[in-house]
Image (cartoon, rainbow, N blue to C red):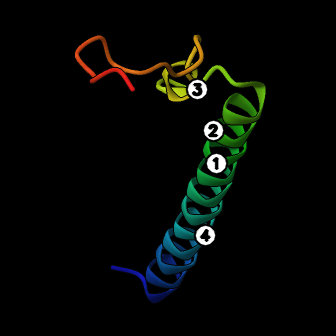
Amino acid sequence: MDPRQTKSDDRDSKRVLGWGVMAVIVLVLLALLGLYWISAKGRAPGVEGATPQTPHSAPANAPAK
């Protein structure tokens, strides 16, 4: 194989690796931003159930005072 072709292939491989790493970083940051946005809006799974809808009252089988 021609040495110039090998050098070009190595350079192309590094370039593709760099773009791939940058794409993964951008996707992870977008995913984190999306999760933050969803949780800030209160639409994340489990957020609605975390706050009680009715005030706490004594259980029905609690002894009367």
Closer to the N terminus: mark 3 or mark 1?
1
Closer to the N terminus: mark 2 or mark 3?
2
Q: Position of residue 63 (x, y in %)?
A: 27, 24
User: Which residue is labeled 2 in the image?
Assistant: 35
Tell me the tag on residue 32. Answer: 1
Tell me the tag on residue 18. Answer: 4
The amino acid type of the residue labelled 2 equals Leu
Q: Quadrant of the N terminus?
A: bottom left
- How far is mark 4 from mark 1, CA to CA? 21 Å
Check if mark 1's residue and mark 2's residue have beta carbons within 8 Å.
yes
- How far is mark 4 from mark 3, CA to CA? 45 Å
Q: Residue at x 48, y 79 (%)?
A: 10
- How far is mark 2 from mark 3, CA to CA? 20 Å
| Front position in the image: 27 or 2 | 27
Q: Position of residue 14 (x, y in %)?
A: 54, 76
User: Which residue is labeled 3 in the image?
Assistant: 51
The amino acid type of the residue labelled 4 equals Gly
Q: Quick check: 36 above or below 5?
A: above
The amino acid type of the residue labelled 3 equals Thr
- Secondary element at tag 3: loop
- Number of residues whose C-alpha sits closer than 10 Å to that of mark 4, classed few (under 14), some (14–19) or many (20 or more): few
Check if mark 4's residue and mark 2's residue have beta carbons within 8 Å.
no
Q: Position of residue 8 (x, y in %)?
A: 55, 76
**Front tag of 4 and 3:** 3
Closer to the N terminus: mark 4 or mark 3?
4
